[in-house]
Image (cartoon, grey):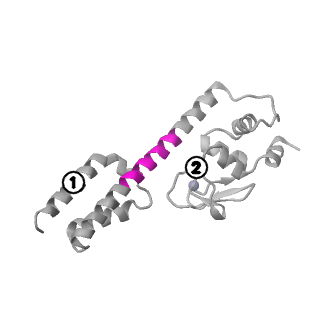
């Protein structure tokens, strides 16, 4: 049995996803951890995966290789090390570790941004509800917020880039509405 087969015996795709901080989903479909899309187009079984958007596919080893931008050989060493498999004596090199750390930092930054974007999305939603309860849905301000909510419902992360503008916008909309429409 070669090392690839040995790894497949010990580690499944869901194990890999859990280990490196990705959610596993119902029906084994999630947002692709490789290209970071917005839809759950990444399908997996215990031993293989396929992304219908970026066409990435493979096994545990190639999944780790593609998530961290390392070679399959380096991915074997990383899995062996992270899951304490003792299948090889090789350790990740310093350069690999740096690269892996950088990819992890990027992923965490994306997660933080997604959370912050979600918060801003909720603020917009709140403002929309307030204006709606006062004026109904046929005023321009509510329609404008509706368009924002539609545009960023699936991926609110970009809202972070203009957070201050949005906060000002919400204040202005409320001000404008106070003066009789
Ligand atoms: Zn993908």
Q: Quadrant of residue 137?
A: bottom left
Say left or right for 130 vs 70.
Answer: left
Is 10 rendered above or below residue 39? above
Examine the structure image and report whether residue 111 is included in the region drawn in magenta.
Answer: yes
Looking at the image, which residue is at 60% across and 52% down? 23
Range of magenta residues: 106-121
Q: Residue 34 bears which disc, if any?
A: 2
Examine the structure image and report whether residue 21 is included in the region drawn in magenta.
Answer: no
Please, what secondary structure does the residue beneath circle 1 have? helix
Residue ID for mark 1: 171
Q: Position of residue 117 (x, y in %)?
A: 40, 51
Mark 2–mark 1 distance (CA, rounded to whole Å): 39 Å
Q: Position of residue 86 (x, y in %)?
A: 82, 34
- The C terminus is located in which quarter? bottom left
Q: Residue 163 bears which disc, if any?
A: none
Q: Are marks 2 and 1 in contact (CB under 8 Å)?
A: no
Earlier-in-chain disc, 2 versus 1: 2
Looking at the image, which residue is at 27% across and 69% down? 132
Q: Residues within 10 Å of mark 1 (few under 14, many from 20)?
A: few
């Amino acid at each position: 049995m070669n090392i690839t087969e040995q790894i497949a015996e010990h580690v499944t795709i869901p194990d890999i996803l859990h280990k490196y901080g990705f959610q596993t989903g119902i029906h084994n479909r999630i947002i692709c951890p490789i290209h970071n899309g917005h839809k759950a187009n990444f399908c997996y079984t215990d031993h293989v995966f396929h992304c219908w958007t970026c066409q990435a596919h493979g096994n545990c080893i190639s999944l780790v290789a593609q998530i961290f931008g390392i070679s399959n050989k380096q991915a074997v060493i990383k899995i062996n090390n992270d899951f304490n498999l003792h299948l090889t004596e090789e350790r990740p090199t310093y350069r690999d570790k740096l690269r892996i750390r950088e990819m992890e930092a990027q992923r965490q930054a994306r997660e933080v941004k997604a959370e912050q974007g979600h918060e801003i999305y909720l603020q917009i939603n709140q403002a929309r509800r307030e204006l709606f309860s006062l004026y109904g849905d046929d005023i321009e301000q509510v329609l404008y917020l509706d368009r924002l909510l539609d545009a960023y419902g699936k991926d609110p992360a970009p809202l972070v880039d203009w957070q201050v503008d949005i906060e000002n916008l919400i204040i202005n909309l409320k001000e404008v509405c106070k003066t009789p429409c």
